[in-house]
Image (cartoon, rainbow, N blue to C red):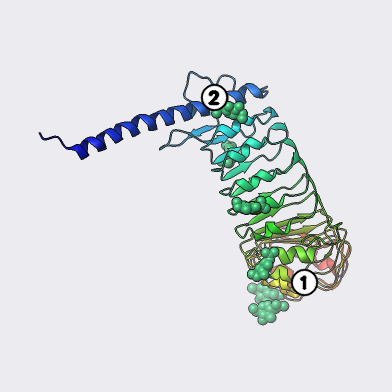
């Protein structure tokens, strides 16, 4: 057999790679294990969920809440949801450098999010909802370019929403509801055209600055109007002012629209809502400054399952023909100033199980009893 120098070279390179690659992978799984043990040591675990299940003697890949990749043996998911864990989030989490999925929701984690998490640039799913985390929404979230989901609902985050979130250019779900955020929503957020769901309800997002852009609801929707993939929009108990703008009719993918309990919101419900032919839930409630008739175009949206317009100051009558609403399960119109008769076609809504019409000026409610 003749000596083949190129074969020799390839062989040497292969051996080198084998040793180096093996070394890297061993080092990194060890890094992951070290990081996870630091996490275990840094938090209180009153139910002993991790105590006997995160032992250095077994591979991290078998630990509860931990998943490893098949190709690179690295931790690719950490899911510690609902384990009654307490403590601050350890900075060592930032060493799980392959991690695409992190779910710490429904525990008692408190304190600030450590900046080391900004190194986890592979993250796609980030869930911290239902904890007691505080501080501002960190600007380093902008580093997480691949993230599709950021859920931080029901914590005590405060401050304004950082403009750096615009760099989360693949974000589809942003849930910051039930926190203590205030100030204006940065205009740049609405350049994340991948966004499908935004939840900002139960904060104090407001428009006290005169030159703010996206805070008054018309302008907010002007910004949102570019989010043509948006499927769900909840805006509840914020301090947004103005009227519901016609441009809301541009959000053709909307399946759920909820605008509730905003004292500063007045005017009428725009008939352009009738363009939203994928809408299943329409909830515009508890706003006494909202006047005028219910646009008849709404009763043409055959996909609607819930129409909830209670607690406003809506007047006029219901249209005679409600037969387009063949999927309607709930109709809530109570506590308005609606009048005249209730159309008999309401009896043709075979899916209807909840009907609330009280505290209006309807005549002839009695016939409903024979339905
Ligand atoms: C984490 O686990 C819970 C319960 O098993 C599950 O509902 C949730 O979807 C998981 N989180 C992620 C990000 O997969
Ligand atoms: C892991 O992270 C901590 C805190 O960020 C750091 O001090 C430590 O050096 C890191 N360890 C490894 C093995 O990378
Ligand atoms: C977004 O990222 C780009 C490029 O990395 C950077 O130049 C820009 O300042 C970032 N924007 C924000 C608002 O952080
Ligand atoms: C929305 O899109 C229009 C037209 O493409 C653009 O001029 C406008 O700046 C965009 N608005 C925002 C808030 O990005
Ligand atoms: C409702 O739909 C019908 C048939 O598609 C159409 O003729 C009518 O103009 C629509 N009404 C409203 C108020 O949009
Ligand atoms: C209700 O349905 C019946 C049978 O499908 C139809 O004859 C009737 O015209 C409908 N009534 C109203 C008010 O739409």
Whole-percent x and y of residue 239?
84, 55
Estimate the x, y position of residue 213 in percent, counting from the top left. 78, 62
In the image shown, does 316 or 76 lie closer to the viewer? 76
Classify mark 1 as within 8 Å of ligand 5 or not, answering yes or no. Answer: no
Q: Position of residue 135 (x, y in %)?
A: 76, 39
Looking at this view, name the residue that lies furthest to the front: 5
* Whole-percent x, y for residue 180 in the image: 80, 44
Q: Is residue 102 above or below residue 283?
A: above
The residue carrying mark 2 has its beta carbon less than 8 Å from ligand 2: yes
Q: Secondary structure at mark 1?
A: loop
Looking at this view, is 109 or 365 the one in front? 109
State the image quarter where residue 43 is shown: top right
Please identify the residue farthest to the left as the structure is shown. 1
Which quadrant of the rendered structure holds the C terminus?
A: bottom right
Residue 300 can be seen, yes or no: yes
Above or below: residue 36 compared with residue 250: above
In this figure, which residue is indicated by the disc labeled 1? Answer: 270
Name the residue beneath numbered marker 2. 34
Decide: is 301 above or below 134: below
The numbered mark, 2 or 1, whose residue comes first in the sequence reads 2
CA distance separating discs 2 and 1: 57 Å
The residue carrying pointer 2 sits among few (fewer than 14), some (14 to 19) or many (20 or more) residues within 10 Å by Cα, namely: some
């Amino acid at each position: 057999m003749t000596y083949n120098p190129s074969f020799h070279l390839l062989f040497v390179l292969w051996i080198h790679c084998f040793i180096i690659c093996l070394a890297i992978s061993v080092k990194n799984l060890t890094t992951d294990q070290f990081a996870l043990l630091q996490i275990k040591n840094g938090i209180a675990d009153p139910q002993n969920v991790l105590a006997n299940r995160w032992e250095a003697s077994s591979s991290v890949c078998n630990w509860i809440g931990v998943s490893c990749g098949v190709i690179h043996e690295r931790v690719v998911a950490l899911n510690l949801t609902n384990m009654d864990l307490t403590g601050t989030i350890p900075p060592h989490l930032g060493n799980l450098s392959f991690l695409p999925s992190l779910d710490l929701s429904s525990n008692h984690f408190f304190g600030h999010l450590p900046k080391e998490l900004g190194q986890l640039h592979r993250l796609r799913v980030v869930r911290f909802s239902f904890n007691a985390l505080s501080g501002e929404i960190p600007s380093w979230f902008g580093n997480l370019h691949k993230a599709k989901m950021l859920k931080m609902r029901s914590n005590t985050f405060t401050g304004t929403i950082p403009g750096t979130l615009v760099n989360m250019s693949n974000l589809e779900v942003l849930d910051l509801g039930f926190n203590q955020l205030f100030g204006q929503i940065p205009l740049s957020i609405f350049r994340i055209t991948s966004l499908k769901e935004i939840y900002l309800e139960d904060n104090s997002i407001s428009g006290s600055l005169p030159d703010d852009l996206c805070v008054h609801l018309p302008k907010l929707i002007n910004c949102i109007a570019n989010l043509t993939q948006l499927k769900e929009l909840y805006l509840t108990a914020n301090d947004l002012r103005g009227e519901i703008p016609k441009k809301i009719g541009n959000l053709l993918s909307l399946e759920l629209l909820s605008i509730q309990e905003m004292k500063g919101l007045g005017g009428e419900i725009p008939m352009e809502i009738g363009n939203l032919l994928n809408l299943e839930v329409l909830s515009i409630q508890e706003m006494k400054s909202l006047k005028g008739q219910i646009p008849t175009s709404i009763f043409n949206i055959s996909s609607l399952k819930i129409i909830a317009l209670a607690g406003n100051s809506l007047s006029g009558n219901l249209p005679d023909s409600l037969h387009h609403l063949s999927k309607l399960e709930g109709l809530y119109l109570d506590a308005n100033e609606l009048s005249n008769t209730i159309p008999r076609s309401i009896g043709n809504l075979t899916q209807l199980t909840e009907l609330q019409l009280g505290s209006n000026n309807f005549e002839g409610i009695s016939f409903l009893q024979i339905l």
